[in-house]
Every structure is written in structure tokens, then in C-alpha cells.
């Protein structure tokens, strides 16, 4: 009797183990979707593409996000801003003082992130993370079934968007970390596929020329599959944005003719904002002349807080150099970009960056304007001025510059400049028009111009240096230390070796 | 020899039978707490030489004449004397587990073994070592008392968990927490502060493979087995224990500037490098008569300036007085226990209330426990029901450099800052409306304001229920089943009130609630075969099937714009569009299925073998690696039982142990094997995005351990010692492989690498004096552990915080730029390059080196002494940690010119000022950046006077009249003094980097313990 009991028990145990156990152990994640079933329908795909845009808003280094990294980098490195004494948080201070080294977190902003002693939190956002997420969707996008023609078109557009984002992010990495912008110099790794063993991903750097080729090729692929028809949603990348990005890329490559052609596509489609519309761009009241902007939600990181914290501390103020460039009364841009507040008291900077102040309820919450038509005028002006074989290029260039100035400055009297002066004028105009939009530092690098912060503000708490020359190591950004340690194929920029 | 003895015995029996009328008396002996039969109990007829033992069924026979007293002795149980009457022919005896000799029993959830026959390594703490220690979370009481267990407090917050490391760190990224088992049920090791320590009967820490392989894939970090008190047969017993006390700040090596020093410093720096104060407002320079800007002032203005400086100099706020307080402590505990043969109970209730030494920090606990035991013929049931409710309140931004952290503001706030003016707090929000102009940055006041306007408290409900059933199928075979639940609901509530900042539109208050629920249940069922034969063989076999299931959920919601009159309730959330609310949460679960086999065989109590096997299947590894077998084998040789040692009179016990086995490690994360997507959003639409690349090869972390030990007692058991040597190799380590950013991810969790912990541990105690009225015992326990990373697989060495994980070095090795002093000519901070040259350039990537020790101490332990004189007793316990090097992040803030308006360390008074100055403090100006270097790695080794208890047992004749059986009055001090070179508030911590932590408190209490 007992033996039977034991036998039953053993048989029961074995049975339980064999069948029930394995079932018990088949537990799937409850908070996440397993990758192989994540993108199966068009509706999944819609979500996945939105998700890639969303990663541009992910936190990158400290309080940066991937989307605004360019803006902050440029503000800290160039002469747009200064560090007022009231910034006691230390936020960005090392970079502002040009104390750069491969383990300085601020220099990582456009590359990636790592664990650090002072920041044990892993920030997942990076340009390469956005690229990876786009590549993951691109890997499966062709297999997503479509039933209607509308879906087919939508899918084509989404594929084009992903390719454009991929090119856009690589371009941001390239202009930050390239040795310099000469074709034979060290460029960046270009990621076009996914390796399911991420530990095996150890790419080497292409040359700058090769990197540009890849960017161009993705942009061209996107252009060729973008369905025709206008899309009004400026929070998403459009065919027009591809042209705009091409113009920008060609400008860096000094492919003047191509830059002018691409910029023309945009200029001919979208007009400059009127003086009445202009302030509304910055409060997101209208989308005049916006080609692409990154939408921000209430709970997102706020770009405005970088300049002025939610507690009202001005951590980075507009530089007197920039403030002085404006005709404050006549230039419609001045009030939208900068606010002079003399009521803040002693030892407090009056020069507030107003571009992202937004409104009083959600201070500092503004969408990131990533591409605007105004930039196209300036690109084309510079391209025409440099273009040797375009007859009358100089006149065309002057006319583009005058068109922009007339739109911005009341009673502006059009002026003609010779080539040399014209380039300087275009640079000055870029400085003003595109201030705090992540261009200044890279514009200076494009033509190896020194970064000169004089005149200094009275309460500038910056470093000992006021001028950074292209021969200085700190003029360039180092490849982050963690990248060099994780990837033996990576090489450091020469000046940092 | 043995034969000779039995012959002798036989002769005696024959002789006895000749003298008196003999009759045969039979009996059986069982354990009082679970009704298991007890084989091998020695039974002695008093006044004669007759001795016998119970057989495998716990039964014995004796030939007796007349009435006799029998003395029953068994390891781990109280020795019992019973009277057998002339007419008794069958007696049934229950032995009561002995608290004092509990150390002789090793308890696991699957077995209860006599130490004499146990081949594993374990440390046992008994009730009196735990019950009265004034800490919120009982595991702190293990500090310095269990050899091989490093117990360290992370925070002085009442109720915070200690970190336990058993025989060294054997993981890089996994958890080092041992598995906690309370009354046979696994419980979360980090949240045990709802358990009443006075209910604890014993804590057993299982250390080697023979002991931990029972727990298979969860055994690598050691196992802490807690049993609670149970009722015993006998009259009802009541106990009341009460403590009243106070917690105060411990001794520290704190040295920040006083007002006079700070003002002088401001003036001097102004003279040395006026640029430093450019656009920073510091009164010591602004109003200085030596400031060139003040040279042309009128005499009255100069006098006014001097007056201002004088009044500032006289303020001298000691911020320690502001942020530290004396915390009240009280605790009341009542229990009742008793029962009959069939039914026994233990029931207790507790109120615990401890205030932290920081304002707003406290812990309260109400706990209840009822343990029931029932026996009826072949059936027995043991039921444990424990329920605890605990409320804790914490400080702002603990362990953070934020100035809202009171322990940071203690350093930051200027001595000439006066937070209250005419009883009103002036903080940055209202400083402009102060009646006098404020010349400091209000850092301290801002922390006070946040303390008053913010709350962060947690409600914890924890329930632990166990039912253990046993049925005796035959004389040798038992069926057992254990069902248990560990339930935890932790509700964290944070409110932040509207702060009136004049210059800003009213900032909205917020209400945050995080609700975490953790449910773990376990069921273990199987058969137990016990057999003893020929009076020398003992066999115990067990086959069990176990299911472990864990479910966790977390819900967070944040409401903004709360009504300040409805603080503490979500009803205060308006849910308006201008102040939107947020909700989020998570869920996770896991399952573990196991087949367990245990075998132990003992020959003649001399040789014992323990073999364990456990086949674990888990939901959290990759499918291919799902099922893994774990095992151990142990040998035990009770050498004292050998004939050649039996006669050595001074040796009372000698035992050798050895074991080898394989265990696994607990998993961080339940779904690491999967490549997954999570939800996100963009521009008003929902989205999904890849959040983990996954790793389908994800496997277990495995530890193989070899352990040998020796236990001995000498000179009538007055000297007791136990020493162990072990070699623990952990492989398949979870490593966060740092990835190239180009992969789109930062790290990937893989199994690679090997680590070794090799060490020596021991306990030694001696009763120096053991007289009737005077007793003195001294004891010590220690662990010396050498950790070494043997292999990191494909992974290059990598940096974790300020430490490096590198082959050949111990885990936790500090990695920093080597400090080379201050350059005499310029006052620059100098650093060593790797080639030994010295430079002023700071470049961690190319300069970081090792050689500054590790933050995991190799040598830890404790020593204690007990003195009893008549009715007085005095217990002292010290614990020590040696070779403990931590990174002190605090000087970076307290010496850096980057935070010029905060108070500075007095170290800056000896800064470099002129060429030729020889000092260790670099020049102080805006271009002299204070950086982290080897200078900041400090020796945090310490000896701490952990506990001192002076007790007085009230004489019986005084109290018996009022019906009290025994009463004891005691005073105790916890963490009385710390000897250390560390410069912060507290060297003890559970991590590497010191950054304004909540220091451990010094607690004095007065206690009363009454039994009636």
C-alpha cells in the first residue's frame, strides 16, 4: 500500500516536472514587448516610427537630450553665450571654460553616454541610439503587410523618414567629432545595420569624405522614395526637409553648386515669415518657415531651462558680443531671441536668452526648431558667393542676404558687398539669425575661424582664455574615453592623442 | 574499548537485576516543537551507571527497579529529568529546544541538523544576541557577531537595511544579498524592517556549499535563516520588554570654517587673487578695508563696514545644531507563550518608535506574531503568522550633493548665515523681504525650508505566513508539505508644497505616491525517510518538490498643484490641465521550480556524510540554460569520538569538516534574455521603441566552493573555537559589458568572467573566569577574505564608478589619478602620469592608476566580552573593518573654488599662497580646479564600540511576591564610539563613494525585561 503511494507520488512528481513546470517557467515580459512580435502591422509600424522620433527627446548627458545636444554644445563652446556668476550649479562649466578631455561629460553630448563616478545613472539617449532604433525598424519594415494603397504610401514615407533621421543623426556626430572637415581626415563610423550581439559592434572610423558620402546616399535614397504630395506636419520629416538637410550637408562639404540647388528647392516652396508671424515661431503659435521641429511635451526636458533654470537662475546668458550685433529697435529678431532685464539686481546678468522662454505657464518649454527656411537663404547666399562658375553669383548671393535682412529688419536698405566682405556678412547674419540653434560653433569650425569671446560681460565667470584658435586642441571635441575603452578599433582625434 | 564498556554495562545490569525486582520500561522521546522523533537521545538513570540511547524511532527500553529519576540529554535541547514511578511501564517524553544550546543545531528550511553531525559551515546567533539591540532592521545586530559575514549599515535612517556580504563579493553586477528565509519562506532581504527582532529565536547564516546548495540557484551569496519563537509545553509565560532611549550624533572629524575664519578667508583670497570674487558677493571681501574698492570710502562708511563684519563674525551658526537632533526612542514588547501536548502557541505584539538624528526622520512599527503548533497522533502542524506595519519618514536628497540634503547643507551653509530673523525663516524665496539685507546665499535656510515644506514617508505592510504539515506514514517515512507567503506592500508618499518664490509665478506643489506590492509564495512537498539501525547507523533521506513564484507590481502617480490643506492625500490633486498629473507603473514576475534531494548518513556519530542535489528550472534565464543541477557533498569527522582521543581529558570536542559544491546566484532582472520594445510617445501619439538588445545566452552565475573547518572545545568547554578555510570560485559572472555607443546601447549584460574569494574565518571564545558569582568570557570572530578577479572573458577591464574591474585585482579596486602634491612655485595641483613624471594636466583616461586599495574590506570582524558578577552583567561588543578604502567626494565640494559662496573646509586655511609655500592644499582661485584624485581616497578602516549593555537581574525574593518570575533592568549604548582616520561624519557605509550620507547614530537606552 505504501509502495503504491510512493510510486504514485514519484510518478506525479515526474509528470508535474515534465509538463507543468516548463509551462510555469514560460513567463514573458509584462512591461515590454518581445522584439519579434513588436512590429507586425501598419499600426505597430506607425508606433515604431513615432518611437524613433521620441528617442531624439531622450536624455543624453546630464540634462541634455539628443535633440538639443547641438544647441547646448554650441552655446557652451562658442561666443553666443557667457557663464554668469550666478551659475553655481557647475552645469556645463568645464566645457564653457574649454577644459576639455575625453572623460568630460559635456563633450559626449553628441556621441553617447556612459556610467560616470558622479552620475551613476545610465542615460540611454544618443545619436547612435536613435540610429540604432531607426535601423531596427528598417530591418523589418519591408515585411510589414499593407492592404491599401494609402498604407503603401504611408509605409514608403515612413521608410524615407527613417533614412533621413539616420542621415541627420550621423551628420550631427560627424560635425562634432570629425578630426576636421577635410575629406581625408578622420570621420565617424556609419551604422546601417543591426548586430544582435551588441558586444561585437566595434566599427572603425571612416574618413570625413566617406562619412559624407554615406550621409548623402541615405538622403538621396530617402528623397527617391518619399511619396509626392505635401505633408503639413512639421513635427515629422518631409521630402522638403531632405532637401534642406542636403543643402546643409553640401555646405559643410563645400559643394557650393549642389548646396544652392538643394536650398532653392526649399526657398521656392516655403516663404520667409513676415514680421508679424516671426515672434509666433518661438512661442509655437505658428509654424511659419519651419521645415522640421522636434515636438516637446509638458513633461519633456526643456531646452529653455538650460539657459535659465526653473528656479529663475540664469545659468547661461546671451553674450554682449551677440547682443551688440543687433539693431535692437529695428530687428524683429532681437526681442524674440534676447530679453534685457535690468531689474534682476546686482551681480545678476540682464541678458536673458528668450528664444526658448515659451510662455509663463510652461517656462522654457519650446519645440526645437531644427530646420528653418532662413538658414536656406544663408546657405544659398554663401554657396552663390563661393560658386565660381555661376555667372553673377555674387549678385545672387547679395540678393539672398538682402532678402533675409529685409524680412527681419525694419526699413533695411539693401547693400552690396564684395566676396570677402559678403562671407563675413553672411557669417554675422548666421550668428544672429541662427543664435542658440546649434550652428555657431560648427560654423566657426567650417572655416577654421577662431572663437573669440571678447568683449566679456561684467559678471563673466569664465576661464582664463577668451580666444580659442583652430590650432588649440580644445577647439575640437575628443572621442569620448568610454568609446575608446569599449571599442579597440576606435582612434582618438590627433590633438587628443 | 567499546566492547569492554558494553560488557561492563551488561555486568552491571546483571548485578542490578540481582538486587532488585526488575521491570521493563519502554518510552519514546519527541521534540516539543515539531513532534519529530529524536533518535540518539542519551538516557541516564540517576544514581546508577545505567545509560542508553533512543533508537531511530526515538524509542528506548530500560530495566528499572522501583522509582527512578531519568536524565535525558540531547544536543540542542534542554536536559530534562523526569521521575518514573513504580507503576509506569511506558513513558512519553518531550524535549524542549534549548535556546542556549541552539548553536548546536543548524536549521535550514529543509532540515534541522545537529552541529556534531553537520559537515557545513554556519554561524548561529541566538535570541539574546538579537532581541534587545535597538535597531529598526534586525540584520544590523549581526555586525561583528557572525564570522565570515560582513554587515555594514548604509544609512543612519532608522529602519534602513544593512548590506550583508557572506564570504566576500562573488558577483560584479549581481546582488550580493544573501537569501533570507524566515520560518521556511524566502523573504526580500532588503525590506525586513517590519520584522520584530524580539520575536527572533535564532539567526543562522549558512556559508559553504554543503549548507547553501540546498538553495541551489539562490545559494551563492549565502543564506540567512531566521526562526521565530514558538510555544512550549508548560504553564503560560508572559514577557514584557520595554526600552526607552535617545539617539544622538556620533563623534566626527568635521572641520568647516567658523565665521571669523570664513571672513578672514574671504578677505585673504580677495587680496591674493581678486578675480576669484569677481561678481561673487562675499562680505568678507566686499566690506574689507583692505579691498582697494573701499580705500576711498568715508570714515563713517568704513566704520559701518567694520560694524557689518563684526556682527557677521558674531553670528557663528553651528549647522550641526540645526540639522542634527537628539532622537527619541521607545519600544514595548509583550508576548505570551504556553500550551499542552497537543497545542502550543506563542503570541506577541510590539510597538517600536525611533527618531533619527536628522529632523523629520523616524521609524515606527507595530508588529504582531502568532505561532501555533499542533500535534495529534501521526500528524503535526506548525503555523507561523507574522504581520508588521511600519511607517518611516526620511530626509531630503539623502546621499546627494544637493543643498537640500541636510547633511550636505551642514557643510555648505555659511557660519554667518542666520536662518531665522525675529523667528521668521528667510530662504531664497523670501530673502528679498527680510528686514535686514542678507549677505549670504541662504543655502542652509533653503534646506530648512525644503525640510519644512516637503515630506517623504513610507508605509510598509509585511505579512509572512507559513504552514508546515507533517504526516507520519510509517515508522520511518514522513510526508511533509510547507506552504508559505511573503507579502509586502510599500507605499511611498511624497509631498512638496508651494514655495513662495517672489520672482517666479507661484510654483505648484506636488503629490507623489509610489505603491509597490511584492508577493512571493513557495510550496515545498515531499517525503522524508529516517532510519537508524544497529544503534550506529543513521540515515536520513529527503525528496522534495518546490515551486517558488514571485510577483511584483509598482504604481506611481504624481499630481501637481495640490491643495495645501489636503496634504498627504491624493484627494488634494486638482487634475487641472495647467497642472497635469502623471501615472506610470510596472509589473514583473518570475518562477522557480525545483527538485531537491537530501541524503545524510551518520556512522556511530563519528562519521557523517551530507549529500544534496537540487535541480532548478527558472523563468529568468535563456531557454537553453533553463534547467541546471546544483549539488554539494560534505564530510564530517567527529574525532573526539575516536578511541585514541576519548581519554584526553582536556579535549572536550574535536571535529573536522569538509565540503565541496556548486551553487548559483540570484538574478538581477527577470527578462534580460529578451530583446524588447517599450512604450514611448512623440508629438501627442504613442510609440514603441527598442529598449534592450537582449541576450538569449543569458545564463546562471555559478559558484563552486571548497570549504574545510575545524571545531574544538577545551578545558571543560571553557574554550571554544571554530576555524574555516574556503576557496570560492564564481564563474559565468554577470557583466555589464560596456558597449561602443555605435551599437545603440550603453551596456549589455553577459555572462563572462571568473572571480575568486579565498579566505579564513574563525570564532574563538574563552571563559576566563567561571565561578558562581563571577563569570568572564571574551570572544572574537573575524574573516579575512582575498578577492581576485580571475577572468573577464571577452571584456576589457572596465570602470565602475571610481573603481576598476580588472583581471588580477580585487573587486572594488580604486582607480584614480595619483596625486603628486602642490607645486611649490605656482600652487598648482600636480598629478602623476603613468610613466611617473609629474604634470599639472589632469587627464584621467591617461593617468588613472590603481594601488589605492579597495572599498570591499578584506579583514572584518568583532570582539566581545561578557562579565557577570552576582546580579550584574556587562556585555560589550566591538566590530572592526580593516583595509577599507573609500572615495571621499565631499572635499571636492568643500575645497572647490567652483562653489565659492558655500562654506569651505578649514583645510583651505593652509592653502598655497606664495611661491615657496609647502602645503598639500592647492591655490584657491577661479582657475585652480579642485579635482578628484588619489588624495580623496581615504582609509575608512574603523573600530566601532558597537554595543555595551549593563544588566541587573532583580533578586527573586524581591519580585516573587508580586508574581514576577524574573526581572532584569538594563542600560545599553549602541555605536558608542568610533576610532577611525576617516574625515567625514561616518566611515561605515555600504558603498564606495562618500557624498553627504546620513551618519549612523549613537543610541542610549534604558530597558526593562520582566517574565511572569
Image (spheres, coloured by chain):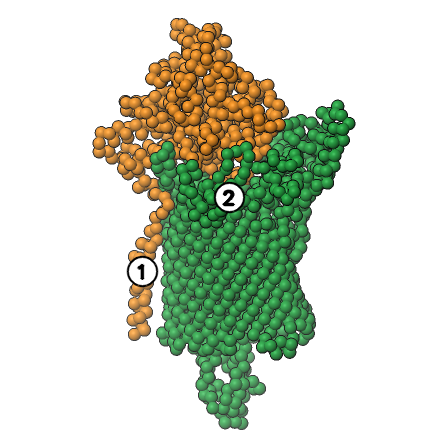
Chain colours: A orange, B green
Total number of numbered labels?
A: 2
Mark 1 lies on a secondary structure that is helix
Q: Is residue B704 visible?
A: no
> In the rendered structure, the residue with mark 1 lies on which chain?
A
Circle 2 crowding by C-alpha within 10 Å: few under 14, some 14–19, many from 20: many
The residue drawn where x is 47% and y is 88% is B88
Residue B682, relative to residue A238: is it above or below? Answer: below
| Residue B456 image position (x, y, % from top left) | 51, 48
Which sits in the foreground, B732 or B335?
A: B335
Which sits in the foreground, A207 or B509?
A: B509
The image quarter in which residue B125 lies: bottom right
Circle 1 crowding by C-alpha within 10 Å: few under 14, some 14–19, many from 20: few
The image quarter in which residue B895 lies: top right
Q: Residue furthest left?
A: A148
| Residue A9 image position (x, y, % from top left) | 32, 67
The image quarter in which residue A291 lies: top left
Q: Which mark is residue B496?
A: 2
Which quarter of the figure is the C terminus of chain B placed in? bottom right
Can you identify the residue that label 1 sits on? A16
Closer to the camera: disc 2 or disc 1? Answer: 2
Q: Which mark is residue A129?
A: none
Which sits in the foreground, B960 or A486?
A: B960
Alpha carbon of mark 2 to alpha carbon of mark 1: how far?
A: 53 Å
| Residue A409 image position (x, y, % from top left) | 46, 14
Q: Residue furthest right?
A: B299
Q: Is residue B80 visible?
A: yes
The residue drawn where x is 49% and y is 9% is A420
Q: Residue furthest top?
A: A391
Amino acid at each position: 500500500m505504501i509502495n503504491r503511494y510512493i510510486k504514485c507520488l514519484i510518478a506525479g512528481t515526474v509528470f508535474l516536472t515534465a509538463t507543468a513546470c516548463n509551462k510555469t517557467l514560460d513567463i514573458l515580459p509584462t512591461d515590454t514587448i518581445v522584439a519579434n512580435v513588436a512590429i507586425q502591422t501598419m499600426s505597430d509600424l506607425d508606433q515604431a516610427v513615432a518611437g524613433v522620433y521620441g528617442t531624439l527627446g531622450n536624455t543624453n548627458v546630464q540634462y541634455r537630450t539628443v535633440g538639443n545636444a547641438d544647441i547646448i554644445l554650441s552655446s557652451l563652446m562658442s561666443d553666443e553665450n557667457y557663464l554668469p556668476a550666478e551659475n553655481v550649479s557647475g552645469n556645463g562649466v568645464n566645457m564653457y571654460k574649454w577644459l576639455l578631455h575625453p572623460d568630460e561629460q559635456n563633450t559626449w553630448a553628441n556621441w553617447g553616454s556612459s556610467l560616470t563616478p558622479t552620475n551613476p545613472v545610465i542615460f540611454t539617449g544618443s545619436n547612435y541610439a536613435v540610429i540604432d532604433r531607426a535601423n531596427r525598424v528598417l530591418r523589418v519594415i519591408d515585411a510589414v503587410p499593407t492592404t491599401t494603397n494609402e498604407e503603401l504610401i504611408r509605409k514608403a514615407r515612413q521608410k524615407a523618414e527613417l533614412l533621413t533621421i539616420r542621415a541627420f543623426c550621423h551628420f550631427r556626430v560627424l560635425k562634432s567629432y570629425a578630426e576636421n572637415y577635410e575629406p581625408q581626415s578622420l570621420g565617424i563610423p556609419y551604422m546601417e545595420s543591426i548586430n544582435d550581439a551588441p558586444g561585437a559592434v566595434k566599427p572603425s572610423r571612416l574618413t570625413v569624405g566617406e562619412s559624407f558620402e554615406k550621409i548623402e546616399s541615405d538622403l538621396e535614397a530617402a528623397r527617391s522614395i518619399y511619396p509626392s504630395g505635401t505633408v503639413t506636419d512639421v513635427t515629422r520629416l518631409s521630402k522638403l526637409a531632405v532637401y534642406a538637410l542636403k543643402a546643409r550637408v553640401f555646405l559643410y562639404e563645400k559643394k557650393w553648386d549642389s548646396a544652392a540647388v538643394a536650398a532653392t528647392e526649399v526657398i521656392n516652396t516655403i516663404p520667409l515669415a513676415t514680421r508679424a508671424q516671426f515672434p509666433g515661431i518661438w512661442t509655437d503659435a505658428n509654424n511659419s518657415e519651419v521645415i522640421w521641429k522636434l515636438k516637446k511635451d509638458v513633461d519633456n526636458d526643456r531646452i529653455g531651462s538650460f539657459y535659465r533654470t526653473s528656479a529663475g537662475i540664469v545659468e547661461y546668458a546671451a553674450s554682449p558680443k551677440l547682443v551688440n550685433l543687433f539693431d535692437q529697435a529695428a530687428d524683429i529678431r532681437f526681442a524674440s531671441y534676447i530679453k534685457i532685464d535690468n531689474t534682476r539686481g546686482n551681480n545678476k546678468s540682464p541678458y536673458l536668452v528668450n528664444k526658448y522662454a515659451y510662455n509663463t505657464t510652461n517656462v522654457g518649454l519650446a519645440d526645437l526648431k531644427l530646420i528653418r527656411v532662413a538658414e536656406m537663404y544663408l546657405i544659398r547666399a554663401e554657396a552663390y558667393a563661393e560658386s565660381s562658375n555661376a555667372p553673377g553669383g555674387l549678385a545672387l548671393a547679395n540678393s539672398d542676404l538682402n532678402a533675409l535682412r529685409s524680412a527681419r529688419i525694419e526699413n533695411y536698405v539693401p547693400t552690396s558687398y564684395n566676396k570677402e566682405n559678403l562671407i563675413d556678412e553672411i557669417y554675422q547674419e548666421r550668428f544672429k539669425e541662427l543664435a542658440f540653434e546649434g550652428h555657431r560653433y560648427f560654423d566657426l569650425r567650417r572655416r577654421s575661424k577662431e572663437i573669440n569671446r571678447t568683449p566679456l560681460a561684467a559678471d563673466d565667470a569664465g576661464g582664463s582664455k577668451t580666444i580659442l584658435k583652430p590650432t588649440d586642441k580644445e577647439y575640437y571635441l575628443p572621442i569620448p574615453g568610454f568609446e575608446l575603452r569599449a571599442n579597440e578599433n576606435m582612434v582618438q582625434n590627433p590633438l587628443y592623442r | 574499548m567499546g566492547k569492554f564498556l558494553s560488557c561492563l554495562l551488561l555486568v552491571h545490569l546483571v548485578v542490578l537485576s540481582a538486587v532488585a525486582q526488575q521491570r521493563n520500561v519502554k518510552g519514546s522521546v519527541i521534540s516539543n516543537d515539531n513532534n519529530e522523533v529524536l533518535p540518539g537521545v542519551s538516557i541516564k538513570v540517576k544514581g546508577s551507571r545505567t545509560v542508553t540511547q533512543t533508537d531511530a524511532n526515538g524509542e528506548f527500553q530500560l530495566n528499572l527497579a522501583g522509582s527512578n529519576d531519568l536524565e535525558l540529554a540531547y544536543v540542542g535541547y534542554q536536559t530534562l529529568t523526569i521521575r518514573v514511578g513504580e507503576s509506569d511501564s511506558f513513558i512519553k517524553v518531550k524535549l524542549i529546544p534549548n535556546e542556549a544550546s541552539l548553536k548546536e543545531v543548524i536549521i535550514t528550511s529543509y532540515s534541522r541538523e545537529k552541529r556534531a553531525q553537520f559537515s557545513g559551515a554556519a554561524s548561529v546567533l541566538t535570541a539574546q544576541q538579537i532581541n534587545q539591540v535597538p535597531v529598526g532592521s534586525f540584520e544590523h545586530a549581526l555586525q561583528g557577531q557572525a564570522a565570515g559575514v560582513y554587515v555594514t549599515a548604509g544609512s543612519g535612517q532608522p529602519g534602513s537595511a544593512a548590506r550583508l556580504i557572506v564570504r566576500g563579493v562573488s558577483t560584479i553586477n549581481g546582488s550580493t544579498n544573501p537569501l533570507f528565509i524566515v520560518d521556511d519562506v524566502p523573504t526580500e532581504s532588503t525590506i525586513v524592517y517590519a520584522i520584530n527582532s524580539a520575536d527572533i529565536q535564532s539567526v543562522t547564516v549558512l556559508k559553504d556549499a554543503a549548507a547553501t546548495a540546498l538553495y541551489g540557484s539562490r545559494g551563492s551569496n549565502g543564506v540567512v535563516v531566521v526562526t521565530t519563537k514558538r510555544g512550549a509545553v508548560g504553564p503560560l509565560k508572559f514577557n514584557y520588554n520595554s526600552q526607552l532611549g535617545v539617539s544622538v550624533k556620533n563623534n566626527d572629524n568635521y572641520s568647516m570654517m567658523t565665521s571669523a575664519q570664513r571672513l578672514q578667508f574671504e578677505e585673504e583670497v580677495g587680496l591674493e587673487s581678486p578675480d576669484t570674487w569677481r561678481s561673487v558677493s562675499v562680505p568678507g571681501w566686499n566690506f574689507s578695508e583692505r579691498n582697494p574698492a573701499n580705500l576711498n570710502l568715508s570714515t563713517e562708511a568704513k566704520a559701518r563696514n567694520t560694524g557689518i563684519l563684526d556682527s557677521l563674525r558674531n553670528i557663528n551658526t553651528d549647522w550641526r545644531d540645526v540639522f542634527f537632533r537628539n532622537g527619541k526612542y521607545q519600544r514595548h514588547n509583550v508576548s505570551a507563550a504556553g500550551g499542552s501536548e497537543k497545542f502550543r502557541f506563542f503570541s506577541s505584539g510590539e510597538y517600536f518608535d525611533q527618531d533619527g538624528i536628522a529632523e523629520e526622520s523616524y521609524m515606527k512599527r507595530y508588529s504582531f506574531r502568532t505561532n501555533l503548533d499542533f500535534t495529534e497522533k501521526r500528524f503535526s502542524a506548525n503555523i507561523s503568522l507574522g504581520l508588521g506595519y511600519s511607517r518611516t519618514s526620511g530626509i531630503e536628497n539623502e546621499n546627494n550633493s544637493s543643498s537640500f540634503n541636510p547633511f550636505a547643507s551642514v557643510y555648505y551653509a555659511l557660519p554667518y548665515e542666520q536662518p531665522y530673523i525675529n523667528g521668521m525663516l528667510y530662504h531664497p524665496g523670501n530673502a528679498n523681504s527680510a528686514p535686514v539685507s542678507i549677505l549670504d546665499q541662504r543655502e542652509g535656510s533653503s534646506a530648512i525650508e525644503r525640510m519644512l515644506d516637503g515630506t517623504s514617508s513610507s508605509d510598509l505592510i509585511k505579512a509572512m505566513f507559513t504552514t508546515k504539515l507533517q504526516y507520519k506514514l510509517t515508522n520511518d517515512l514522513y510526508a511533509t508539505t510547507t506552504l508559505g507567503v511573503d507579502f509586502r506592500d510599500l507605499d511611498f508618499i511624497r509631498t512638496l508644497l508651494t514655495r513662495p518664490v517672489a520672482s517666479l509665478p507661484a510654483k505648484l506643489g506636488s503629490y507623489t505616491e509610489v505603491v509597490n506590492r511584492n508577493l512571493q509564495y513557495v510550496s515545498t512537498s515531499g517525503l522524508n525517510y529516517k532510519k537508524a539501525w544497529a544503534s550506529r547507523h543513521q540515515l536520513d533521506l529527503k525528496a522534495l518538490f518546490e515551486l517558488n513564484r514571485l510577483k511584483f507590481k509598482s504604481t506611481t502617480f504624481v499630481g501637481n498643484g495640490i491643495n495645501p490643506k489636503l496634504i498627504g492625500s491624493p484627494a488634494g490633486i486638482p487634475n487641472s490641465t495647467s497642472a497635469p498629473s502623471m501615472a506610470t507603473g510596472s509589473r514583473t514576475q518570475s518562477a522557480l521550480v525545483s527538485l531537491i534531494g537530501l541524503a545524510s548518513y551518520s556512522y556511530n556519530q563519528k562519521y557523517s556524510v551530507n549529500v544534496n542535489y537540487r535541480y532548478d528550472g527558472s523563468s529568468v534565464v535563456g531557454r537553453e540554460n533553463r534547467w541546471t543541477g546544483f549539488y554539494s557533498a560534505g564530510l564530517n569527522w567527529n574525532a573526539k569520538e575516536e578511541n585514541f582521543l576519548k581519554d584526553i581529558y582536556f579535549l572536550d570536542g574535536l571535529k573536522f569538516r569538509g565540503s565541496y559544491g556548486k551553487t548559483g546566484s540570484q538574478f538581477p532582472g527577470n527578462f534580460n534574455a529578451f530583446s524588447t520594445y517599450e512604450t514611448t510617445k512623440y508629438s501627442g501619439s504613442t510609440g514603441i521603441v527598442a529598449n534592450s538588445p537582449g541576450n538569449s545566452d543569458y545564463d546562471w552565475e555559478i559558484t563552486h566552493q571548497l570549504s574545510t573547518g575545524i571545531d574544538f572545545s577545551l578545558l571543560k568547554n571553557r574554550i571554544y573555537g571554530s576555524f574555516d578555510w574556503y576557496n570560492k570560485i564564481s564563474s559565468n559572472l554577470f557583466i555589464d559589458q560596456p558597449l561602443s555607443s555605435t551599437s545603440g546601447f550603453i551596456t549589455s549584460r553577459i555572462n563572462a568572467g571568473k572571480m575568486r574569494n579565498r579566505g579564513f574565518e574563525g570564532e574563538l571564545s574563552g571563559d576566563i573566569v567561571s565561578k558562581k558569582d563571577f563569570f568572564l568570557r571574551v570572544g572574537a570572530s573575524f574573516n579575512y577574505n582575498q578577492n581576485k578577479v580571475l577572468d573577464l572573458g571577452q571584456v576589457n577591464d572596465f570602470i565602475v564608478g571610481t573603481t576598476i574591474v580588472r583581471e588580477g585585482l580585487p573587486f572594488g579596486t580604486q582607480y584614480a589619478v595619483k596625486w603628486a602634491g602642490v607645486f611649490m612655485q605656482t600652487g598648482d595641483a600636480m598629478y602623476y602620469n603613468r610613466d611617473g613624471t609629474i604634470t599639472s594636466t589632469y587627464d584621467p583616461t591617461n593617468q588613472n592608476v590603481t594601488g589605492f586599495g579597495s572599498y570591499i574590506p578584506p579583514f572584518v570582524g568583532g570582539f566581545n566580552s561578557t562579565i557577570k558578577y552576582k546580579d550584574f552583567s556587562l556585555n560589550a561588543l566591538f566590530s572592526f573593518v580593516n583595509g577599507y578604502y573609500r572615495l571621499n567626494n565631499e572635499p571636492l565640494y568643500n575645497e572647490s573654488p567652483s562653489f565659492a559662496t558655500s562654506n569651505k573646509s578649514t583645510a583651505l586655511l593652509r592653502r598655497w599662497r606664495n611661491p615657496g609655500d609647502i602645503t598639500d592644499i592647492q591655490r584657491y582661485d577661479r582657475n585652480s580646479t579642485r579635482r578628484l584624485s588619489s588624495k580623496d581616497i581615504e582609509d575608512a578602516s574603523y573600530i566601532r564600540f558597537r554595543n555595551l549593555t549593563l544588566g541587573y537581574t532583580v533578586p527573586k525574593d524581591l519580585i516573587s511576591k508580586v508574581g514576577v518570575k524574573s526581572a532584569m533592568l538594563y542600560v545599553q549604548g549602541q555605536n558608542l564610539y568610533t576610532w577611525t582616520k576617516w574625515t567625514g561624519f561616518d566611515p561605515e557605509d555600504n558603498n564606495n563613494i562618500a557624498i553627504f550620507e546620513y551618519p549612523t547614530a549613537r543610541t542610549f537606552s534604558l530597558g526593562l525585561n520582566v517574565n511572569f
